[in-house]
Image: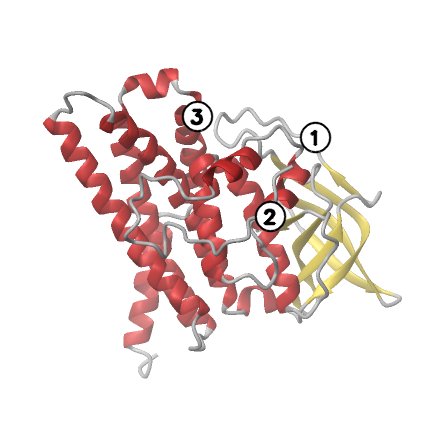
Amino acid sequence: MIAQFDRPLAGIITSPREPWYAEAAFHDDLAKLVTSNAPTAQKITGLARFLHLSGQSTQTDQWEALVEIAAIDVAVARMLEPHVDALGILAEAGHESPDAHSTWGVYAADVPEFAVAADDEGGQTLLTGEKAWCSLAAELTHAIVIVEGIDGSRACAVDLTNSRVQAQTVSWPSLGLKEIPSGSVMFDHAPATTVGPPNWYLDRPSFAWGGIRVAACWFGGAVGMARNAAHRHLRRPTPSPMGELQLGQLDAEISAVRAVMDQAAAAADGEDEFSRAEAWTLALRVRNIVYRSVQRVQHLSRELAGPAALTGDAGFAKADADLTVYLSQHHGLRDEAALGGDLYKQSHGDEL
């Protein structure tokens, strides 16, 4: 059994002098957990325990952990990220820490043809309807579900094992993130616990830090591919000038993201208070930078590693496929436009 990691987490974001292509000191034990054949729930709780991730964890520790996990397996980081998010949501709303063996998702997708309503009956909140894009719903024990009530949107904690909650059977042919089936869930007057006041989930500044937490997973996946490619290049007896160029380009891109995320982590964990708008502007900026850099790192890694990696290295090919699907969930140009819109509003605040 792997023991709990008991040293400060010095990862890629806050240790800029450590080469990004070097494995972290705790890599071997972490890799054993990430690559084990344990069931999803056991893997999530094992990783959270190993890395001391809880509802009170700093954003820095969360992002560092997810970068290193995603560098080993993007899908496992994708499993853990919403669990950590849910623990933080519960803690921020003043709820007690859930059972250590519980595993959580966060289902917030807003799809017009799918809707879940919250009704209060006899002092109990009941959910009815169908929610789309509920990742791992058949494998988790609980979830925070964003639903509509008469007083606005609500965040509701739901026991997914309740008989009034049914994860729908889903065909999931995706090659990327194949371990994360994301079908819909039916709620039939399912009992739930409201978390925070109406509209609180989206209105809180820390919603923005969750957006950067996802970007940390993207970045970790890119770092994993870049490490693989760099190791291949550094083992070559006569490296080509083109390979040296690509390695240098990778270093520049990764170093830029490290600096941006380090600055964002210092802001998120600092003493300065952010409004929701200020925090989300920062998150949009960071996510857009990471998104574009990760795309380039992914491309450069494929070129530097060569076709042998994509055709003969299952880990490299899996990371490439996982990262492609994960990045496709980003809003891309819409988020870049949103950032520009935010800046315009800020500069014309007195006029609008």
Reading the image, the residue beneath label 3 is: 315
Residue placed furthest toward the left: 241
N-term-proximal mark, 2 vs 1? 2
Q: Residues within 10 Å of mark 1 (few under 14, many from 20)?
A: few
Colour style of the rendered protein structure: secondary structure
1 or 3: tag closer to the N-terminus: 1
- The x, y position of residue 204, in whole percent, is 54, 69
In the figure, 316 relative to 279: above or below?
Answer: above
Q: Residue 318 at x, y = what percent? A: 44, 27
Q: Is residue 254 visible?
A: yes
Kindly identify which numbered label has been placed on residue 4.
2
Residue at (36%, 57%) from the top-left corner? 14
Q: As displayed, is residue 38 above or below residue 213? A: above
> Which residue is at 42% across, 49% downward?
216
Label 2 vs label 1: CA separation? 36 Å
Q: Is residue 262 left or right of residue 164?
A: left
Location of mark 1 (residue)? 169
Residue pictured at 42% horizontal, 31% vertical: 319
* Front of the two marks 3 and 2: 2
Q: Give me the disc on residue 184.
A: none
Q: Amino acid at mark 1?
A: Thr
Task: Answer with left or right where residue 6 lies relative to residue 96.
Answer: left
Query: Marks 3 and 2, how far apart in space?
Result: 26 Å
Q: Of the residues under marks 3 and 2, which one precedes in the sequence?
A: 2
Residue at mark 1 to residue at mark 3: CA–CA distance: 28 Å
